Image: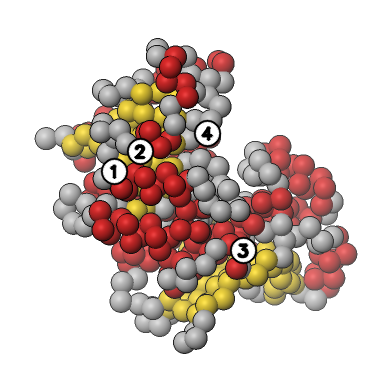
């Protein structure tokens, strides 16, 4: 018998819309091969309106509305201000998916949405780094108490299975260090600058390609990377820190002369994200570093990213995401949804 999972989406930007396209595209395949069907029964947004339908929203119509007018053409106009917290309380939502924008100051209100959803017996998925970077321990504890899933594969490296790797494959290992390139915008800019493109033009090109944060300083000043480092440290090390406790230097002051000086030394500059723990403490850091051209991270160019985990039993493991697109980020949500399905056979 096909299992029906009803979804509530908080946010419906590029990632949410791509998720909708995948759900439409794969509906028949998943029903036939996995005996599962996903129905979006509620969507709430800040600027596009909101949709609620207990039997399932017409996603094709919702996408067409946004393409034509930028807002939903609601059957029930009173639902245009339907709030995220109201969505988390709906009895006909099984899984709440939080895909709103990052608040680097506190991680709220996204973390509030997930707390409310868990308290109302929902499984939760987020691609928003804020809750994991600021409130992971609280969320993890609450999810355990409520016997619900808390999943967040899309928070670091798009759809690359970092957290699944840690949770499912590296069981029994202790990870003492990680190091990588985790911000696509700064990596693209540094790659362009190495090819001779001036900083401002490289930033403009990145904007035109559409992967710069709405507030570019989140990328350029290293805040997005710091949030990812904090999230990784909280999950891997149980560090209980926030992005503000990660040492952070962005690429604002990197200019052509820095790039050329590094080249003369047989090096290239990358924004390196790292975290480690010893017996007494944990430390996270984001900073531009001149690394040897023989370093594997020197080969990570453009919008690609990579992460190396140093373990006590499995040695060093590196995983790379090659020039990811929005579909990969949306797939992270799908991956987490199938992990929720698995909870019917074993606990998350």
Q: Residues within 10 Å of mark 2 (few under 14, many from 20)?
A: many
Which image quadrant: the N terminus? top left
- Residue 236 relative to residue 171: left or right: right
Q: CA distance from mark 1 to mark 2?
A: 7 Å
Residue at figure coordinates x 21%, y 57% from the top left: 347
Residue under circle 3? 244
Name the outermost residue toward the bottom. Answer: 279
Q: Which comes before the other along the chain, label 1 or label 3?
A: 1
Residue 201 image position (x, y, % from top left): 81, 45
Residue at figure coordinates x 27%, y 48% from the top left: 340
Label drawn at residue 13: 4
Q: What colour-coding does the image apply?
A: secondary structure
Q: Which comes before the other along the chain, label 1 or label 2?
A: 2
Tag 4–tag 1 contact (CB < 8 Å): no
Name the outermost residue toward the left. Answer: 1
Residue 4 image position (x, y, % from top left): 21, 34
Q: CA distance from mark 2 to mark 3?
A: 29 Å
Residue under circle 2? 88
Q: Residues within 10 Å of mark 4 (few under 14, many from 20)?
A: some
Q: CA distance from mark 2 to mark 4?
A: 19 Å
């Amino acid at each position: 018998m096909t299992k029906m999972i009803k979804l509530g989406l908080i946010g419906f930007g590029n990632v949410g819309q791509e998720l909708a396209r995948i759900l439409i595209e794969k509906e028949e395949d998943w029903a036939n091969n996995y005996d599962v069907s996903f129905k979006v029964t509620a969507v709430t947004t800040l600027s596009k309106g909101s949709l609620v339908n207990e039997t399932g929203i017409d996603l094709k119509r919702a996408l067409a509305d946004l393409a034509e007018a930028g807002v939903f053409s609601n059957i029930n106009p009173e639902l245009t201000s339907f709030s995220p917290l109201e969505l988390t309380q709906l009895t006909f939502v099984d899984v709440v998916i939080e895909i709103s924008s990052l608040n680097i100051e506190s991680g709220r209100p996204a973390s509030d949405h997930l707390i409310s959803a868990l308290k109302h017996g929902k499984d939760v998925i987020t691609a928003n780094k804020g809750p994991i970077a600021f409130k992971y321990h609280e969320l993890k504890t609450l999810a355990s108490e409520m016997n619900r899933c808390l999943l967040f594969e899309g928070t670091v490296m798009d759809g690359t299975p970092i957290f699944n790797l840690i949770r499912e494959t590296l069981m029994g290992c202790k990870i003492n260090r990680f190091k990588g390139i985790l911000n696509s915008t700064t990596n693209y800019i540094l790659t362009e600058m190495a090819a001779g493109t001036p900083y401002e033009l490289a930033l403009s090109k990145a904007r035109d390609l559409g992967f710069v944060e709405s507030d570019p300083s989140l990328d350029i000043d290293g805040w997005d990377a710091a949030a990812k480092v904090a999230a990784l440290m909280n999950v891997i090390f149980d560090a209980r820190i926030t992005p503000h406790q990660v040492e952070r230097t962005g690429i604002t002051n990197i200019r052509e002369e820095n790039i050329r000086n590094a080249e003369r030394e047989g090096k290239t500059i990358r924004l390196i994200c790292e975290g480690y723990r010893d017996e007494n403490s944990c430390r996270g850091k984001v900073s531009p570093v001149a690394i040897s051209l023989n370093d594997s991270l020197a080969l990570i160019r453009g919008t690609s990213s990579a992460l190396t985990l140093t373990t006590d039993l499995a040695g060093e493991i590196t995983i790379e995401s090659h020039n990811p697109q929005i579909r990969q980020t949306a797939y992270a949500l799908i991956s987490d949804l199938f992990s929720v399905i698995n909870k019917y056979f074993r606990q998350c």
